[in-house]
Amino acid sequence: MSAALEALLLRAEALLARLEKVLPQSLSEPDWSASIAFRYRRRGQAGRLEPVRHVSTIRLSDLQEVDGQKERLLRNTAQFVAGQEANNVLLTGARGTGKSSLVKACLNEFADRGLRLIEVDKADLVDLPDLIDLVAERPERFIVFCDDLSFDEGELGYKELKSILDGSVAAATPNVLIYATSNRRHLLPEYMKENLTYTHTEDGEVHPGEVVEEKISLSERFGLWISFYPFSQAEYLAIVAQWLRSFGVDESAIEAARQESLVWALERGSRSGRVAYQFARDYAGRHGLHHA
């Protein structure tokens, strides 16, 4: 009987071990001293915070031709770090214009004052309440960062985000804000047929239909909208010059590279900050240069 009982216990332990792998696991604290930025990763039923070992070193001074956007995000983040009222932020607009770079630069600006960043993929936003509970009693201030956030038609994750933004984050945990970037102003695809859902009153007022209202309601839950626009040729060239200077290129060489940088942008069909940086890296690589 003892041998049979022992075999039964071994089978039960094996079964429990298998069940533990599929059951939701509580979120454990990372080594908060390991980094100023963390990435939330889900592995099966378990999620964990992983320190980012090589955080972007971009600074606010590296970002050119976005002074208005920089000032607004800097002010909001400074208020947040100081323990004052601040808003969740949605940064929208043209690709490659510095939306995510500005968030990273703000992290570097305020890291020594206790600011930390947690990057979360949109698919994992349903776990955000667990993340908030984990950091609620921490002395640091946390930005939950959702980069390139958008939802396709039929995806339900945006409803979870709406619920989170509708007061539960800011009211319950004053040390957490959500910063998101997107190429879509309303985070969802918009179609011409949706214009047909608008209704007109007798006095001439226009009211959007339910589908349009649903799409607008998500972005409206972000207290601060910061818009980015495509760069003009002059702005693009100014950004190219800024990045070339960071590689130690002198002014005469920058002027000589002007036409080459315009061709580079034309080949890519975009005059963005990202394209300017990519040209500068290519130029530096060809000339054996490194960041000054």
Image (cartoon, rainbow, N blue to C red):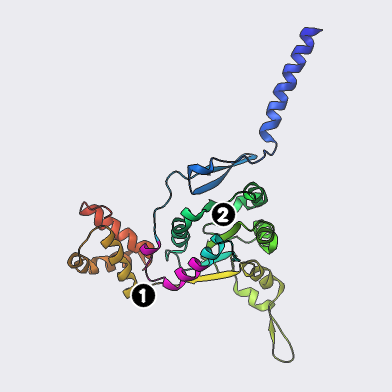
The mark found on residue 47 in the picture is: none
Name the residue: 68% across, 28% down: 18
Three-letter code, disc 2: Phe
Quadrant in the rendering for residue 6: top right
Name the residue: 29% across, 64% down: 264
Q: What residue sits right under mark 2 in the picture?
A: 142
Name the residue: 46% across, 57% down: 104
| On screen, residue 207 above or below 48 | below
Label located before the other in sequence (1 or 2): 2
Span colored in magenta: 60-75
Question: Could you give the CA–CA distance between mark 1 and mark 2, rounded to whole angstroms?
Answer: 35 Å
Of 281 and 48, the residue lying toward us: 48
Q: Is residue 233 left or right of residue 206?
A: left
Let me know if residue 163 appears in the view: no
Of 212 and 279, the residue lying toward us: 279
Q: Residue furthest left?
A: 252
The mark found on residue 232 in the picture is: 1
Of 150 and 28, the residue lying toward us: 28
Q: Indicate which label's residue lies in the foreground, 1 or 2.
A: 2
| On screen, residue 261 above or below 7 | below
